[in-house]
Amino acid sequence: MMRKKRKRGASFGPCRSHGPGPATAPAPPPSPEPTRPAWTGMGLRAASSCAAAAALAAAAGAEQRPRPRLCPPPLALLLLLLLSLGLLHAGDCQQPAQCRIQKCTTDFVSLTSHLNSAIDGFDSEFCKALRAYAGCTQRTSKACRGNLVYHSAVLGISDLMSQRNCSKDGPTSSTNPEVTHDPCNYHSHTGAREHRGGDQNPPNYLFCGLFGDPHLRTFKDHFQTCKVEGAWPLIDNNYLSVQVTNVPVVPGSSATATDKITIIFKAHRECTDQKVYQAVTDDLPAAFVDGSTSGGDGDTKSLRIVERESGRYVEMHARYIGTTVFVRQLGRYLTLAVRMPEDLAMSYEESQDLQLCVNGCPLSERIDDGQGQVSAILGRSLPHTPSAQAWPGYTLETANAQCHEKMPVKDIYFQSCVFDLLTTGDANFTTAAHSALEDVAALHPRKERWHIFPSSGRGTPRGDSHLSVSLGLACSILIVFL
């Protein structure tokens, strides 16, 4: 009895043979289990590289035996599955689209590097930059699929938008500052110069403050206690003039305090006409002398006054020169705080060199040791006059205790508070010192210099207060690049 010859050839599982022979045939030895496809990993594509595609093609060409047409081989099934999932396309062996998330981040840094949270209009400009950043990430999303830096940036943008209450719809910043250049916006002007290759660093800001007996903090962060009775110029440059008038606080004492402030915003091309502001004790208006509350044309004024507390606290924001001024009345006396770009603050003629904010008080007008160390004179004898009985007496211990309630950090502002209480007996000077420190935190550009400690000579300033917006922005950018 002759055995029927078994038809040679590969068998593919349950598929039927198309030649003569039995209905069933023994299964061939099992082939090695194929490697698990890489596309099972999230965000990765199976055989997406040219090398992987070439390997698949070589494997397909290695099979020379005829195969039944009705039963596709495992390789064909795999390729069909990949195509159906959209994970393999004809361009795999071409140069893939470039993920441009780093360009998006660089543009965002360029748009925001000159911004500061203390400047009027910060939120608006920051939100514009965020929306531009979000739009850039959307345009490169396809090429950045699976890129960890891209996904970190998207999450960072969402968090910053929530923190700043930015709407997703609205105007966006242009990566070309020339397009959005506003001649009456100092920040726009400096950004355009950086784009043209001029200044490569953001503008540097200076702070000056006057409060209390009076105590002066200069643009150079020198701290002095002065008498300067009468009218004195604090600032006098080509853009801004600030003059204060000081009167004696206690008869028979050299201590004085400010009871009048005059501020002149000088005319600046098409941005604003000259505007004069004047405040005196018990008359802190929320308008300029001419009755207006702003300067410049358009919806966004280049100069405006904002009243924070009626008759007690006003702010002036001059966008065209990047300057902010705070004026307060505490008790019967006034305080002042100014933030101004260094290049504008130092723009003055030789005849304008008598500026307390620039050079400090003249030596003949100082009543401290010239180093800003009020503690050095606390031990000196205080004035004893008949009027001294008109206020509750303060000892060094009670003055320390009262000032410590508002200012736990015993820096130069704390010691100024103690000095003023011992000199005048007026508790309002405690609030003045505390408010002056708050103004420093709001306007001073360098957090590490907010506090000045007399024990270090001219003071080794270091920060100890709220976390600034710039730090939050820097952290967010750092996260993106990690």
Image (cartoon, rainbow, N blue to C red):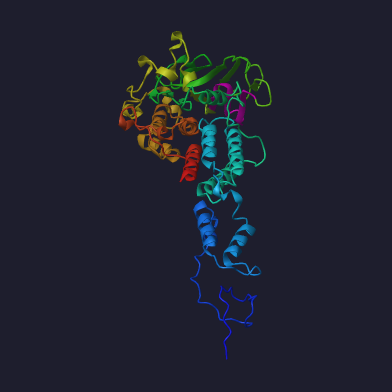
The front one of 253 and 448 is 448
Residue found at the very far front of the displayed protein: 2
Q: Nearer the viewer, residue 115 or 55?
A: 55
Q: Residue at x 57, y 80 (%)?
A: 6
Residue 299 in the image: above or below residue 170: above
Where does the image place residue 184, in percent across and percent down from the top left? 60, 21
Q: Is residue 174 left or right of residue 400?
A: right
The picture places residue 199, in percent across and down from the top left corner, at 47, 23
Residue 416 x, y percent position in the rendering = 40, 30
Residue at the location (51% across, 55% down)? 54
Residue closer to the observer: 329 or 96: 96
Tally of marks: 0
Image quadrant occupied by the N terminus: bottom right
Q: Quadrant of residue 285?
A: top right
Q: Main secondary structure of the magenta part?
A: strand
Q: Residue furthest bottom?
A: 1
Could you tell me if residue 258 is visible in this image? Answer: yes
Up-down relation of residue 312 to residue 78 (above or below): above
Residue 166, above or below 358:
below
- Determine whether, in the image, residue 348 is placed left or right of residue 310: left
Image quarter of residue 463: top left
The magenta region covers 301-328
Percent position (x, y) of residue 139?
A: 61, 42
Visible residue check, residue 282: no
User: Does 35 appear in magenta?
Assistant: no
Q: Is residue 319 magenta?
A: yes
Q: Nearer the viewer, residue 162 or 219?
A: 162
Question: What residue is drawn where x is 62% and y is 67%?
Answer: 72
